[in-house]
């Protein structure tokens, strides 16, 4: 089996929303496997730059690029800069997103639209632009970070659950469109991962007694799943959703 440090040797990966806990872990995992990294961020420049510095200390080439993923022109610029920097684009991890929890009947239309835009529309725009470069090399992997909420639904997360479920639909449809072109598209649906987002949930929603493994997942465990789907270790896997919930949910995806 190929060494971990060579799984993505020389490849170029874009990780969106890489200034948070999960995005940072994913970027570090891909960098440890030999990829060059584009660290996307919207507003937290200091955290993005810290991730870039850590990657560079590992000997990984990395750049931080700011972009508002809700605009098609900004997304196109992000992917173009990534391609121009290293002359290729091999991996896209659609990790950007967020939620504003609240009962559907109480949420403002602006909030509902923003949740769908940041979790689903942005991923569709990024995928559209990345595929254009991946087609040139007949090679690529797109990994969409969905959520356990997409599989089960959670009260107070109507828009978020819908957007993340839409991301699974996007995954499956796009996989069918580009499979014969050497591009694979998969999704990861994390459950309760130890992060700022999970720590902010109501206590009854983050009770570890509901998890078969009896603990929260770690960001690096999500990163390992993403690395698997990004590399040739999963060369015959596309259109799939990896349930990464520690047994919190064991139904069909």
Image: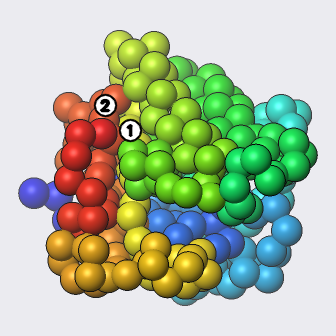
Q: Residue at x 45, y 13 (%)?
A: 177
Residue 140: percent from left, percent from top: 44, 34
From where the camera sits, is residue 83 visible?
no
From this view, report whether residue 45 is shown above or below residue 143: below
Residue furthest toward the left? 1
Quick one: quadrant of the C terminus?
top left
Residue furthest toward the front? 105
Residue 165: percent from left, percent from top: 50, 38
Marks counted in the figure total 2
Q: Nearer the viewer, residue 70 or 16?
A: 70
Mark drawn on residue 93: none
Q: Residue at x 39, y 16 (%)?
A: 176
Quick one: quadrant of the N terminus?
bottom left
From this view, report whether residue 175 is shown above or below residue 55: above
Residue located beneath label 1 in the image? 186
Other residues around mark 2 within 10 Å, as few (<14) / some (14–19) / many (≥20): many
Residue 69: percent from left, percent from top: 79, 45
Q: Secondary structure at mark 1?
A: strand
Other residues around mark 1 within 10 Å, as few (<14) / some (14–19) / many (≥20): many
Residue 212: percent from left, percent from top: 18, 73
Residue located beneath label 2 in the image? 238
Asked whether the residues under the numbered discs 1 and 2 touch, taking CB atoms below 8 Å apart as contact, a structural biologist would say yes
Q: Nearer the viewer, residue 4 or 166?
A: 166
From where the camera sits, is residue 101 visible?
yes
Q: Residue at x 29, y 52 (%)?
A: 243
Q: Residue at x 26, y 82 (%)?
A: 209
Q: CA distance from mark 1 to mark 2?
A: 5 Å
Q: Secondary structure at mark 2?
A: loop
Q: How is the image coloured?
A: rainbow
Point out the tag, 1 or 2, that comes first from the N-terminus.
Answer: 1
């Amino acid at each position: 089996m190929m060494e971990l440090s060579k799984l993505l040797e020389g490849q170029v990966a874009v990780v969106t929303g890489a200034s948070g806990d999960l995005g940072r872990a994913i970027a570090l995992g891909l960098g440890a496997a030999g990829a060059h990294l584009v660290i996307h961020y919207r507003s937290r420049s200091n955290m993005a730059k810290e991730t870039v510095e850590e990657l560079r200390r590992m000997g990984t080439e990395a750049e931080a690029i700011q972009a508002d993923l809700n605009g098609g022109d900004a997304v196109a610029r992000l992917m173009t800069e990534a391609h121009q920097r290293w002359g290729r684009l091999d991996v896209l991890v659609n990790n950007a997103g967020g939620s504003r929890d609240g009962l559907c009947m109480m949420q403002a239309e602006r909030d509902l639209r923003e949740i769908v835009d940041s979790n689903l529309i942005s991923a569709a725009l990024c995928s559209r632009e990345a595929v254009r470069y991946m087609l040139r090399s007949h090679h690529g992997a797109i990994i969409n970070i969905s959520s356990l909420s997409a599989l089960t639904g959670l009260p107070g997360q109507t828009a978020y659950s819908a957007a993340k479920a839409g991301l699974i639909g996007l995954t499956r449809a796009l996989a069918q469109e580009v499979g014969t072109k050497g591009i694979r598209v998969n999704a990861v649906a994390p459950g309760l991962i130890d992060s700022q987002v999970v720590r902010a949930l109501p206590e009854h929603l983050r009770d570890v007694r509901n998890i078969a493994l009896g603990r929260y997942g770690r960001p690096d465990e999500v990163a390992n799943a993403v690395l698997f789907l990004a590399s040739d270790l999963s060369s015959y896997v596309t259109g799939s959703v990896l349930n990464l919930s520690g047994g919190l949910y064991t139904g069909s995806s």
